[in-house]
Image (spheres, rainbow, N blue to C red):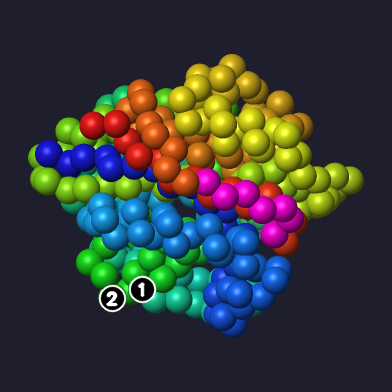
Amino acid sequence: MARIVGGLTTSHIPAIGNAIAKGSHDEPYWKSFFGGYPPVREWLEDVQPDIAVMIYNDHGLNFFLDKQPTFAVGAAPEYYNQDEGWGLPTIAPFKGAPELSWHIIEALVADEFDLVTCQEMNVDHGFAIPMQLFWPDYAERDLRTVPVMINTVQHPLPSPKRCYNLGRSLGRAIEAYPEDLKVVIIGTGGLSHQLDGERAGFINKEFDEMCMEKIVNEPEYFLDMSIHELVRQAGAQGAEFINWLAMRGALNGNVKSLHTNYNIPISNTAAGLMCLENAA
Ligand code: DHB
Ligand code: FE
């Protein structure tokens, strides 16, 4: 049977992609940010997951404001990276796992999550940057991916509770998959940030620290929070935290936090990194 080995979170700020391309890892601005990743990569080397389920948000590449699904799941043999306008280099495609994708889609629809299914899907920085951060050599690996896209850009956005429950359904589906696969779930985006409007540049360290603490073993804390309250506390783009909640929903009751890192600001964002080991 497939087994969920753990959950990871990371911000996906486009500037990270340019820093990787330029090799700026050791510059003073970036050192503490990139310094957070090696312990997580060591854990991944130990665990050797076969599949990365990437819970992310599209930023106008595969879906634009004219057609915006609440939830979409990729079921393609390969996912192509493209830059939706940040000037980022295009990186190698990501391998898909279409059989597992269709199993997940069947289970989520049976649980009344009505999805858009994508047999072709381009993935932007929200997907590509976490992949590069966790597996800089992903193109040479057998690692396969399942993209799970949540709308965080065009209101109405799904509530924290809805996203957590999507994650629970996703977790049950994966654990019921008959093949012996090790699966890691990634929730990307956040933490607090707002890119536009009167609160552009908004960061809420206290709220972020609370999120990083409670998501470990008290995720229920967020289930009665409205999406508008989340936007108030985390900023308009900080709503990406719903991707973290979906990741957490896919894990079992108890998890162990193995590693965290937090840096403000990276570009306009509070960058949060977490590595959660799933209870057996
Ligand atoms: C930034 C952060 C994001 O999450 C994003 O999608 C785009 C830009 C930023 O801080 O610059
Ligand atoms: Fe984003």
In the image: residue 95, left or right of residue 32: left
Check residue 137 in the rendering and tell me which mark sits there, or answer none.
1
Quadrant for the C terminus in the image? top left
Q: Is residue 67 visible?
A: no
Q: Residue at x 39, y 60 (%)?
A: 41
Check residue 90 in the rendering and tell me which mark sits there, or answer none.
none
Picture coordinates of residue 87, whole percent (x, y): 64, 77
Pick out the residue farthest to the top: 224
The kind of secondary structure the magenta stretch mainly shows is strand
Q: Is residue 263 magenta?
A: yes
Check residue 140 in the rendering and tell me which mark sits there, or answer none.
2
Picture coordinates of residue 115, whole percent (x, y): 39, 39
Say whether marks 1 and 2 touch (CB < 8 Å). Answer: yes
- The amino acid on which the numbered mark 1 sits, given as a three-letter code, is Asp
Q: Residue at x 83, y 50 (%)?
A: 200
- The amino acid on which the numbered mark 2 sits, given as a three-letter code, is Glu
Picture coordinates of residue 217, whole percent (x, y): 46, 25
Ligand 1 quadrant assignment? bottom right
State the residue in front, 239 or 31. 31
Label 1 and label 2: CA atoms lie apart by 6 Å
Q: Is residue 174 visible?
A: yes
Disc 1 crowd, CA 10 A, few/some/many (<14, 14-19, 20+): few
Q: Find the magenta span and give its range.
A: 260-266
Residue 160 location, quadrant? top right
Q: Is residue 198 above or below residue 16?
A: above
Residue 152 location, quadrant? top right
Q: Residue at x 50, y 39 (%)?
A: 244
Picture coordinates of residue 214, whole percent (x, y): 55, 27
| Total numbered labels | 2
